[in-house]
Image (cartoon, helix red, strand yellow):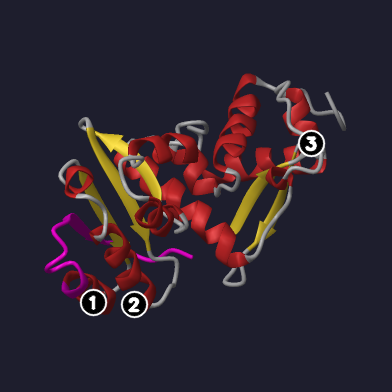
Amino acid sequence: MAGGVIITERDKQVLLFLAKWRFATVEQLIKADIFKTGRKRCYNRLLQLCKSRYIAANRLARGQMYYHLLPDGAETLELDIPWYSRLFKSASDSTVVQYLVWCDYAQARKIDYLSSKQAFQELSQASYDALRRVIKGQDRFYYQDDILHALVADFGLSTKYLSERAAAYGKLPAAIKDRLTVVFLVFNDTKRHAVARSVQHSGLKVKILKAKWKY
């Protein structure tokens, strides 16, 4: 207990969610079924956790509020995380949006992402140069229906960047491309059409999804 707040099992779920996703919004915590009593109740409880220094709140430039874990919150969960970990710090708007979009997508698809090490192992048949081009991107990998997927999400990036990601995956060996589906998540028709042109002769299995921009 800190600042007069008794940590409940629901509070621990909040802290665990932030430990997993780094940043989260009220909407994401509600979608995770951590709060079942409405947005106002969720916000008020998060405010208490902020006042007790278990978590912190910040806003994106366009006003969206988000939360992240603080050292006292990690200590409550008995997580072995050094106090200087980036997990406990805010970040630039562009970085925060990356994590929020990744979380939104995972919740919508009901998937968990692979770690960087796991992704590297899955793609290890590729040459070093081809692998470097893929791994150095801001993409996430996951399995769905026993099929390996790569998520290339548009965080307000240029169409050139998205085309470069398509080219990088296009250079993977056929054995990997045969069992990999590359998912492009974009937020307007211009980028959707640009990606479609980029992958036309790549030999990739591709899904191009258009979503509504929230941030």
x%, y% of residue 147? Answer: 21, 36
- The residue beneath circle 2 is 159
Dot 3 amino acid type: Pro
The CA span between labels 1 and 2 is 7 Å
Mark 1 or 2, nearer chain start = 2
Residue 209 painted magenta: yes
Residue designated by label 3: 71
Of labels 2 and 3, earlier in sequence is 3
Q: Is residue 151 left or right of residue 46?
A: left
Q: Position of residue 166 (x, y in %)?
A: 28, 65
- In this rendering, would 95 be left or right of 68? left
The residue beneath circle 1 is 194
State the residue at coordinates (35%, 56%): 130
User: What residue appears at the point 41 percent right and 49 percent down from the top-left corner?
Assistant: 104
Q: Quadrant of the N terminus?
A: top right
Image position, residue 156 (x, y; %): 44, 72
